[in-house]
Image (spheres, grey):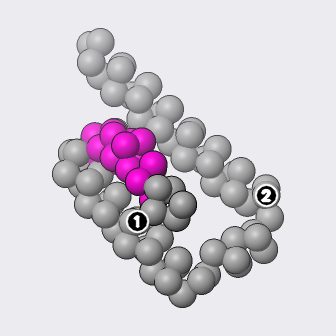
Amino acid sequence: MIYTAALRPPPVVLPLALAFGVVAGAGPVAGLYGAICCGLFAALFATLRLGRYIGLLPDSVSSGFANGVGCIIHTHLRNAHALRSQ
């Protein structure tokens, strides 16, 4: 069961990481390196069993972080679209 759960995120995370690299202006390779780095951190957290401390994080903090990331992506996409249409 654990092994199949580990195989489900990569098809979603890989294109997302490539898109983040492109939106940031660093290119898709930078997004790929970022995804690999995040995967290594996730493996480290799982090995050290640090995931149980996520429950101590208030919902407003994680929600605010996700909203902030969304706003940054929206701003970059809007600026990229404006530059393309000129």
Q: From the image, which quarter does the C terminus lie in?
A: top left
Q: What residue is rendered at 80% in x and 64% in y?
A: 58
Q: Main secondary structure of the magenta part?
A: helix
**Disc 1 target residue:** 38
How far across and how far down the image is residue 71, in percent?
57, 39
Amino acid, disc 1: Cys
**37, 43: nearer the viewer:** 43
How far across and how far down the image is residue 80, in percent?
34, 27
| Location of residue 1 by image quarter | bottom right
Q: What residue is rendered at 73% in x and 60% in y?
A: 61
Is 36 displayed left or right of 62 in the figure? left
**43 is within the stretch colored magenta:** no
Q: Earlier in the sequence, mark 1 or mark 2?
A: 1
Magenta residues (range): 6-22
**Disc 2 target residue:** 59
Task: Answer few, some or many: residues within 10 Å of disc 2's Cα (few below 14, many 20 plus, some between 14 and 19).
Answer: few
Indicate the secondary structure of the residue bearing disc 1.
helix
Q: Is residue 57 above or below residue 8?
A: below
Q: CA distance from mark 1 to mark 2?
A: 21 Å
